[in-house]
Amino acid sequence: MTRRHASKFFPSVIAQATLAAAVAVSAGALVGCKKAPPANADAAAQQALLVSPEDVQTMGNSDFATGPVITGSIQPEKRADLRAEVQAVVLQVLKENGERVKKGELLVRLDDTAIRDSLTSADESVRASDQSFDQAERQFQRMKTLQGQGMVSLQAMEDAEIRRNNTQSDLVAAKARAASARQQLQRTEARAPFDGLVSERKVSAGDTAQVGKELVKVIDPATMRFEGLVSADAMAELKLGETVYFKVNGVESGDFQGRVRRIDASANPTTRQVAVLVDFVGEKAPTVAGLYAEGRVQTQSISALMLAEAAIQREGDKAFAWVLGGDGKLAKVALKLGQRDDRLAQYQVLEGLKAGDRILRRPGSSLSDGRHFEMSKPAAASAAPAASAASGG
């Protein structure tokens, strides 16, 4: 082979050799990456759960209030439905829903034109009847005097007395018609029967109010009470003065406490429930009427193992709790729950736990059975060595 041809051949051979070496190095690097596991994979899997003392609840017996469930609404004791007592057109509605009113304050005014005309006519009849009676009375007195002197007959005197009595009857009837017209005139004005609030306005100016039509509703928010219903099956458990714990929808101030004031003597024939009246005790009652309320009448209190609802994990119909074992491992324990204490949001534990068990108050969803845990030191205890070290330096 000539030198010129060799110079053309060797560069391509060298290039191919260099490329093959580079491919081999790359393949080795890929194989090395596939075989090398992460250094901290096992450590992450075996990392202990750090638990603070605030996250741990020690099980123990506590009082559990039992009794029949009561449902109902918050209603004022003083409430009035003002209705039209005469047929007339509504001229003015002076108060709106939620506005405060004073006793005797005008709320609704009806058209009184026709009634005023009737009153004027009745007053004129009274005036005319009064004049006729006065005249008949004077005539009777004259006849009585003349009859005593023998100048007129007894029959003439009796006729004068009859006329006097008739005019007196006409006067009484005229006064009654005038009083009725005046009363009708007063009924064209709807006034507040007591201090309170307008809870519902039923009419507007221009409406025709028939007799019996609702105009406005007035309530006294200071007289709220719980009007509840209890199943007739639990009627034997109810007693006057028993404590009631209940919640009110829309009110975020927690549970309310009440006391049974009245128990109806008969049950509703349709629902088979007994009406119970409960007064608020110790706390300010809601000021809004009609709010739904639900609770329990505390007929008796027993000692039981109670568990907060936040510490319970549910999987379908099953309930579990996470127990901190003495071996430093978490244990997922199945529970059998009893009744719920609505006042404290706790359940009675029938099986699965015992007094003295330590459980997580608010377990997360990523826990695993058998996982190790460690108790963290309180903040005050961990800060004390650091402070002493700083002073020593």
Image (cartoon, helix red, strand yellow):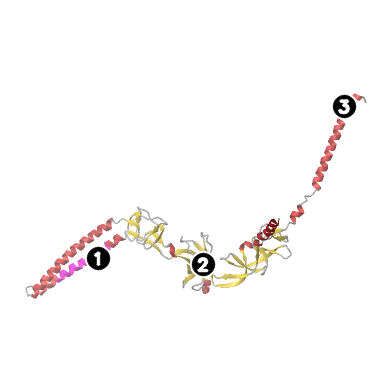
The answer to whether residue 252 is left or right of residue 175 is right
| Residue 216 relative to residue 27: left or right | left
Q: CA distance from mark 3 to mark 1?
A: 143 Å
**How many discs appear?**
3
Residue 23 at x, y = what percent? 83, 38
Q: Which type of secondary structure does the marked residue at label 3 adopt?
A: helix
Mark 3 = which residue?
8
What's drawn in magenta, residue-wise?
A: 161-181
Camera-side residue of 304 and 378: 378
Q: Which mark is residue 257?
A: 2
Instruction: Name the quarter where the N terminus is drawn.
Output: top right
Of residues 319 and 212, the one nearer the viewer is: 319
Is residue 359 at all visible to an observer of this figure? yes
Reply above or below: 153 against 249.
below
Q: CA distance from mark 2 to mark 1?
A: 54 Å
Residue type marked 3: Lys
Q: For the residue marked with disc 2, what is the amino acid?
A: Gln
Instruction: Give residue 314's position: percent from left, percent from top.
Output: 64, 61
342 vs 71, nearest the viewer: 342
Q: Is residue 86 above or below residue 149?
A: above
Mark 3 or mark 2: whose residue is earlier in sequence: 3
Disc 1: which residue: 176
**Few, some or many C-alpha atoms within 10 Å of disc 3 (few <14, some 14-19, many ≥20)?**
few
Nearest the camera: 183 or 152?
A: 183
Among the two numbered marks 3 and 1 on one chain, the one whose residue lies closer to the N terminus: 3
Question: What is the quadrant of residue 2 in the picture?
Answer: top right
Asked if residue 56 lies in the magenta stretch, the reply is no
**In the figure, is residue 346 to the left or right of 24?**
left
